[in-house]
Amino acid sequence: MEQVEKTTNLNDNNLEIEFTNVSKIFMNQNESVKVLKGISGKVAKGEIVTIIGPSGSGKSTILSLCNLLITPDEGEVRIHGKEVLEWDIQELRRQVGIAFQSGTMIKGTALHNLTLPARLQGRTLEDPKKYMDYVGLEEELLSREAKELSGGQRQRLSLARTLVNNPSVLLLDEVTSALDSISAHEVEELILRINREQDTTILWVTHDLSQAERVGDQTWLIMDGKIIEAAPTHLFFNEPREVLTKQFLELKRDKE
């Protein structure tokens, strides 16, 4: 399915995520390493922003800042116009869901995993089947041990678990890279459906240029902790402005 590129005018009413001069430093063997170096960017409600770049460039760090898995050392990250450090962390993580490459499961059944977000809030998940149906999983899998599910099933369950909180923002970190091509396509289609039906804003880190071009409304290239180029996806891949962007795309395409 071809993704129809959205045309979005950013304003205060539809701004979902905003980074302003954000920097992040990690310690590595008693040496400080600046992983993000003053990045700034805006994401409109309902947009899919694909984030590409070399390994270690800071892509996953950008995602982690959005739901306080880590905190910025400099600058501000705003969700719905509110600085992340001002949010109640549980409410922030209800609004901002995250899914990783491995479709990480906790010990127990698929049902135990699916209901985790509700249990953390002290409530009961009323209709687990609804979420299984939505992501294309059979209800009978709820009684199976999560570790026994296939990679594609675990990734679907991971997304269903994220949807329990009805988040307005989804952070996706290489969510299809460990899957076979058929499962990857199915999960990709599911994510596009979530975006389309729920107007969910998505930041999607991927190493797959074809995927980034296929699903993105906007694309950012991150290199050495900086946003080298941010542009509508069609223009990014067909008419890149920056020399570094052209070189990166050429290098990646030569390897594919």
Image (cartoon, helix red, strand yellow):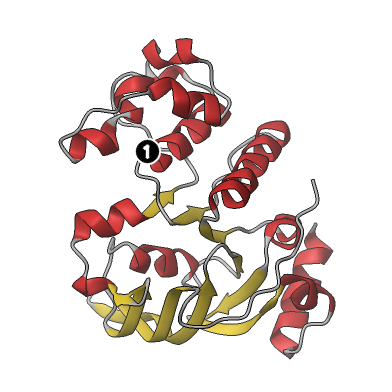
The kind of secondary structure element at disc 1 is loop
Picture quadrant of residue 65: bottom left
Q: Is residue 28 visible?
A: no
Q: Is residue 169 left or right of residue 3?
A: left
Q: Where is residue 52 in the image (x, y as percent from the top left)?
A: 61, 67
Picture quadrant of residue 207: bottom right
| Residue at the outermost left position | 122
167 to 51, vertically: above or below: above
* Identity of the residue drawn at 72% across and 76% down: 248
| 199 and 139: which is toward the camera | 199
Q: Where is residue 119 in the image (x, y as percent from the top left)?
A: 21, 33
Callout 1 amino acid = Val
Q: Where is residue 180 in the image (x, y as percent from the top left)?
A: 67, 34
253 to 168, vertically: above or below: below
| Residue at the outermost front position | 13
66 to 224, vertically: above or below: above
* Identity of the residue drawn at 61% across and 75% down: 220
Which quadrant is home to the N terminus?
Answer: top right
Q: Which residue is denoted by mark 1 in the rendering?
A: 164
* Identity of the residue drawn at 83% across and 65% down: 254
142 to 238, vertically: above or below: above
